[in-house]
Each structure stands twice: as structure tokens, then as C-alpha cells.
Image (cartoon, grey):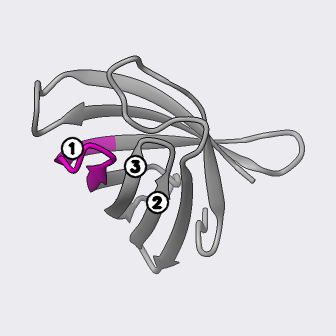
Amino acid sequence: MNYDNKRFKVVTTSENGETGNGTIFLYKQNGAVLTATYSGGQITTGHILGIVDANGTIDMRYHQINVQGELMTGICRSTPQVLPNGKIRLHEQWRWTSGDKSEGVSIIEEI
């Protein structure tokens, strides 16, 4: 699985998440190393650093600044699903490492 130069949008997320309809992610990949930038909706700017395994699953850390000016951090595990149209859908299980340290799930999809 190669995520290089792929863009993703949020399909759904838990109520305690900050990403949403307006958030767009741009992924870059070099070997097993994945990076991403994202913004939009409630996110002013965000970054991801992760490692992609042989099955395409991503173990990542993220940090972002929301529109309230708060710096938020977390960890996430994203499991890919290839859709019939060939696009990638990522099923994400995440946990805040700042704020209330709650957990959630999201689905993002390649655009």
C-alpha cells in the first residue's frame, strides 16, 4: 500500500473528534515512513508522523492546532480498505494524548 500524494477527507468521526467535513489530509510516503499535513473545518493546521506496515496499516502520532488556538496531540492506528472503485478508505482508532485523553473512531476516504 502506498499513500504517497493521496488526499483524504473525513467521512465520519466520533463526537469527541476535531476533524470533520472540511478537513483535508495530504499524505506523503517514503518507504515505510508516512507524513501528512491537514487543515480545514475546526483544524487550523495539523501534522502526522507514522509507520506503514506490510498490510498498509499505519501506526501514527498526530498534533494539531484547532480554531480555538489549542495544541492537541494523539495516537492513531489506521487500517486500510480498498473500495470497489480502487480508492482507499481508512478505519481509524485514535486516542487523545492531551485534553481529556478520550478515545474515538473515524473513517477517512481518498478523494
**Could you tell whether 17 is left or right of 74 in the image?**
right
Badge 3: residue crowd in 10 Å (few <14, some 14–19, many ≥20):
many
Badge 1: residue crowd in 10 Å (few <14, some 14–19, many ≥20):
some
Q: Quadrant of residue 21?
A: top right
Instruction: Pinpoint residue 85: horizontal percent, then vertical percent.
Output: 89, 45
Residue topped by disc 3: 43
Image: magenta residue range = 61-76
**Front tag of 3 and 2:** 3
Helix, strand or loop at mark 2: strand
Disc 3 vs disc 2: Cβ atoms closer than 8 Å?
Answer: yes
Q: Amino acid at mark 3?
A: Ile
Q: Which mark is residue 99?
A: none
41 in magenta = no
> Can residue 62 be seen in this snapshot?
no
Considering depth in this image, is 24 or 70 the residue closer to the camera?
70
Instruction: Pinpoint residue 16: horizontal percent, then vertical percent.
Output: 32, 21
Q: Which mark is residue 38?
A: 2
Instruction: Pinpoint residue 13: horizontal percent, then vertical percent.
Output: 48, 26
**Front tag of 1 and 3:** 3
Mark-to-mark CA distance, 3 and 2: 8 Å
Task: Identify the residue at image location x=45%, y=80%.
Answer: 31
Asked if 77 appears above or below 17 in the picture, the reply is below
Task: Identify the residue at image location x=12%, y=39%.
Answer: 97
Asked if 100 appears above or below 111 in the picture, the reply is above
Task: Identify the residue at image location x=75%, y=53%.
Answer: 111
Mark-to-mark CA distance, 1 and 2: 14 Å
Q: Earlier in the sequence, mark 1 or mark 3?
A: 3
Residue topped by disc 1: 74
Considering depth in this image, is 7 or 58 the residue closer to the camera?
7
Asked if 29 appears above or below 85 in the picture, the reply is below
Q: Amino acid at mark 2?
A: Tyr
**Could you tell whether 58 is left or right of 1 in the image?**
left
